[in-house]
Structures are given as structure tokens and as C-alpha cells.
């Protein structure tokens, strides 16, 4: 999928498959699978007029926040992250709080799952 300079959708590859054998209930969701290293976006509400706001691009996070997300995914706790990045524990706590806020995730488990599905990590 491509976007123009304003972030609007451009070209996309669409594959339509009959999945009636899986379920008879339509969940009204859309998933976009990124190719060639581009992020994937899963289970987007197709009737949400704020679709753009629902998708969180990687560049919404600072370089340091991305480092911290990756370390959380590796299983590091706050103390280990502080030691590895040579920053204070309070700074790591602040980054973690900001990351959860920006990502709209409730906890680290949700953050890692969403980070993997959307290509942040």
C-alpha cells in the first residue's frame, strides 16, 4: 500500500477470499498486511471515521522510545533498561508512561503484541 504526501491512501494490493467456512459473522474489521518491511495494521474498525488516528505510525515514537519498546519486548524490566541505556530509572519510567499513552495500550503485554502486529518492533 502507498500513501501520498498528506498520508492519504494511494495504491494497494487487495486479495478477496470467501471465508464463509470460517464464520458467518462479519466483525466489520480490516487488516492491512505490510510487505517489504512495512508495518501491518490489524483489526481496524472499517466504520470508524477516525481511522487515521487509530493507526499509530512508528515515527510517533522517539528513537529512545523505540529502543525501550524493543527492550520491553526482550523481557527487560525498568532497572535492566536503565542499565542498558545508561539512563536513570525515573527516566525509563517516564518513557514507559509516555509510550503507553501514545500507543493507547493498557500494559506492556498489550504494547508488545501491538508493536509486533503493527511493525514497531
Image: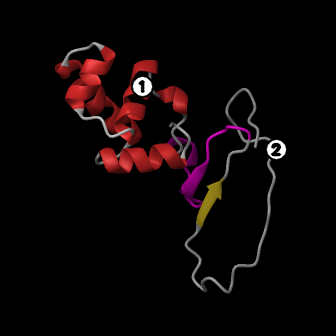
Q: Is residue 111 left or right of residue 22?
A: left
Considering only order in the chain, which callout, 2 or 1, is on the residue closer to the N terminus?
2
**Is residue 33 left or right of 114 when viewed as pictured?**
right
Q: Residue at x 67, y 51 (%)?
A: 33
Q: Nearer the viewer, residue 47 or 28?
A: 28
Q: Secondary structure at mark 1?
A: helix
Residue of label 2: 11
Which residue lies at the image location 73% right of the left edge and 26% below the top edge? 5
Is residue 106 in view from this perspective? yes
Q: Are marks 1 and 2 in contact (CB under 8 Å)?
A: no
Residue at image mark 1: 67
Q: Is residue 55 magenta?
A: no
- The percent coordinates of residue 54 (x first, y second) are 50, 46
Picture layout, residue 9 above or below residue 45 = above
Which class describes the residues within 10 Å of circle 1: few (<14), some (14-19), or many (20+)?
Answer: some
* Residue at the farthest top position: 86
* Residue 50 visible here: no
In the drawing, does residue 19 fall left or right of residue 47? right
Residue 19's image quarter? bottom right
Q: Position of residue 120 (x, y in %)?
A: 51, 37
Q: What is the crowding at mark 2: few (fewer than 14 residues within 10 Å), some, or many (at least 20)?
A: few
Query: In the rendered structure, which segment of residues is drawn in magenta?
Result: 36-53
Q: CA distance from mark 1 to mark 2?
A: 31 Å
Amino acid at each position: 500500500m502507498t500513501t501520498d504526501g498528506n498520508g492519504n491512501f494511494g495504491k494497494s494490493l487487495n486479495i478477496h477470499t470467501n471465508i464463509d467456512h470460517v464464520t458467518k459473522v462479519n466483525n466489520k474489521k480490516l487488516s492491512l498486511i505490510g510487505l517489504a518491511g512495512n508495518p501491518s495494521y490489524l483489526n481496524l474498525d472499517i466504520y470508524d471515521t477516525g481511522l487515521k488516528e487509530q493507526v499509530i505510525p512508528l515515527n510517533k515514537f522517539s528513537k529512545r522510545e523505540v529502543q525501550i519498546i524493543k527492550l520491553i519486548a526482550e523481557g527487560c524490566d525498568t532497572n535492566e533498561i536503565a542499565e542498558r541505556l545508561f539512563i536513570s530509572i525515573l527516566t525509563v519510567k517516564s518513557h514507559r508512561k509516555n509510550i503507553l499513552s501514545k500507543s493507547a495500550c493498557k500494559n506492556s503485554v498489550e504494547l508488545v503484541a501491538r508493536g509486533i502486529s503493527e511493525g514497531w518492533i
